[in-house]
Amino acid sequence: MTTIKLTMAQAVVRFMMAQKIETDNGIQPMFAGVWGIFGHGNVAGLGEALYQVKDKLPTYRAHNEQGMAHAAIAYAKTKNRQQMMACTASAGPGAVNMVTAAAVAHVNRIPVLFLPGDTFATRMPDPVLQQVESFQDMTITSNDCFRPVSRFFDRITRPEQLITALPQAMRVLTDPIECGPATLALPQDVQTMAFDYPVSLFDEKIHRLRRQTPDFYELNDALKLIRQAKKPVVIAGGGLHYSSALKEFDAFVSQFQLPVGETQAGKGALPWDHKHNMGSIGVTGAASTNNLCADADLIIAVGTRLGDFTSGSRSLINPNAKIVSLNVASFDAIKHKSQALVGDAKSTLPLLSKALQGWKIEPSWIKKAEAERVNWQQVVDKVTTDRGTSLPSDAEVVGAVNRAAGEKDMVVCAAGGLPGELQKLWRTRYNRGYHMEYGYSCMGYELAGGLGAKMASPESEVFVMVGDGSYLMLNSEIATSVMLGKKIIAVVLDNRGFGCIHRLQQFCGGPGFNNMLDDCLTTPEGAPKTDFAAHAKALGANSEKVSTISELEAALERAKASPISYLITLDTDPTIVTEGGGHWWDVAIPEVSEREQVRQARKNYDAHKERQFKNL
Ligand SMILES: Cc1ncc(C[n+]2csc(CCOP(=O)(O)OP(=O)(O)O)c2C)c(N)n1
Ligand SMILES: [Mg+2]
């Protein structure tokens, strides 16, 4: 056997470079690059190894480990999981800064290879700087925090362990079902240890993303249910994108004239003006889709994990409706007592199209759906039109940004009031034009996510829509976007606080408390007015502040013309949300309280819980 003497870190890097993914777009390197913030836990080992290959596998320096991992997630999401990045951070705080992002990747099922440095396997210098030191278990390090939020975890305590660990990590990253973060914790001493690795370990490996066809009996059971239905609704989930099944999906819903509701992750599966696209579904759903769900006799859920926002906390879908859930993961397919149809969407939808030939749904249902769709578009037109007031609503800002966005442009968002407004109102023109992290809805994803999305889709103008709260939580990757020449356009909606949580608090019977800056403990002068434009300028971006929607429209044109990242900030009204559509969301209310408002809210809550109970 031919061998090559490499350090463990050199072997990790060499192995990564040998991995390729073959898709309809040809063969691509699996890893487009590595994000890294070095410290003593990775600078000498992995840092040295990455330097050697820097011309073939670029290393990108970020400013915050969570931010860089958000960028890696957004990159892989934009690439439909067909290409990805790795992230390395130093042992201790640098590594743990990535744990939240690992959870984001886990919930959203996005592949990221995490390579945190770890404490010495030999334990000779213990406690090394930044070692947490468990009193009762010497094997615990802070990297154990990655375990619950990784789809695969290993700690490489001997260099030869890579021979079995690396292929397993690649398996998870490329498996449509298990896909998510893979973490290899790399003790700093082991990174530098040499081993005679078999040369064959580094042979080019071409991965293909597995396409599962359905089980014969399960398919027949699903077909039986579908054929009986007269009033179906289809849910379009994120799995459609990852399966590259959009053509097949369009063919399926067009053939049978099926109304479609989009989840946050599924949005863009059909263009907004597609004849059968009813708009969004669920808590932040369009009235069109939600009205249909209340009356439907069958839901065909495709590639969705049926989260509470989609299902209206299990109270949206009429309890008599049957559910057929087509999903690559059996974990998701059996939810809500569904008839599971385990399979890849691209492989399975054509089988349904063929086997269902002759299936006719009620003509009045098709008419009703069309009327609902037209009505809903009128609501969207109305709320996204400039009212000419000095304090615009989020919806008006969404309208202005949407009008400024071109055919191939993208909006990126994650948390606050905006995800709801965007899901209802954003008119998605192309399939990757809507990038919402709403699995974990992690504040601080937006700006860093925008950077990753831009790196994956350089031809797109990337509009990051972000609230003042999320901006203040994590904004450092603006500097990275300027440094790398990866332009984003950030639009900051400053309503002076956590507007959506304030509204939720009031809905739950609470007083204004600790959400809006005016309701927080401050000095007598009050909370400072953050100058977001000056802040972004200080990080190297172009920026300006505007007051009205027409000023915003002009500023967006300047932003598009700017060669570097550009931030526009404006004050917005925290009280206005789009009233049309929407649905109840299960947020638990205290059973006893001294506040009458809370007692009232609880009554309302109990009534909804009854409805939810019927759907269990
Ligand atoms: C990391 C993180 N912390 C807390 C939350 C809970 N949370 C959701 S939205 C929100 C407020 C967001 O404020 P802002 O970005 O200004 O948006 P707005 O609600 O004003 O539209 C909070 C605290 C979260 N989603 N993520
Ligand atoms: Mg806010």
Image (cartoon, rainbow, N blue to C red):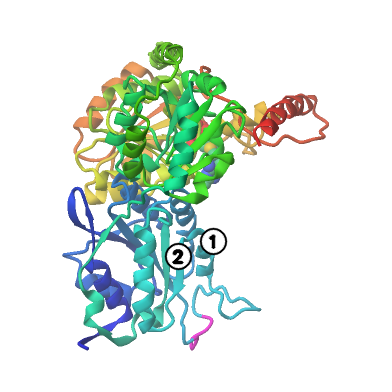
At 31% from the left edge and 37% from the top edge, which residue is drawn? Answer: 350
51 horizontally vs 138: left or right: left
Amino acid type at mark 1? Pro
Magenta region, mostly helix, strand or loop? loop
| Relative image position of residue 440 (x, y in whole percent) | 50, 45
- SS for dot 2: strand
| Relative image position of residue 53 (x, y in whole percent) | 20, 70
Specify whether residue 448 is painted magenta: no
Magenta segment boundaries in residue numbering: 123-127
Q: Is residue 344 above or below residue 171?
A: above
Amino acid type at mark 2? Phe
Numbered badge on residue 152: 2
251 horizontally vs 114: left or right: left
Residue in front for this viewpoint, 115 or 397: 115
Count of labels shown?
2
Numbered badge on residue 148: 1
| Relative image position of residue 393 (x, y in whole percent) | 46, 20
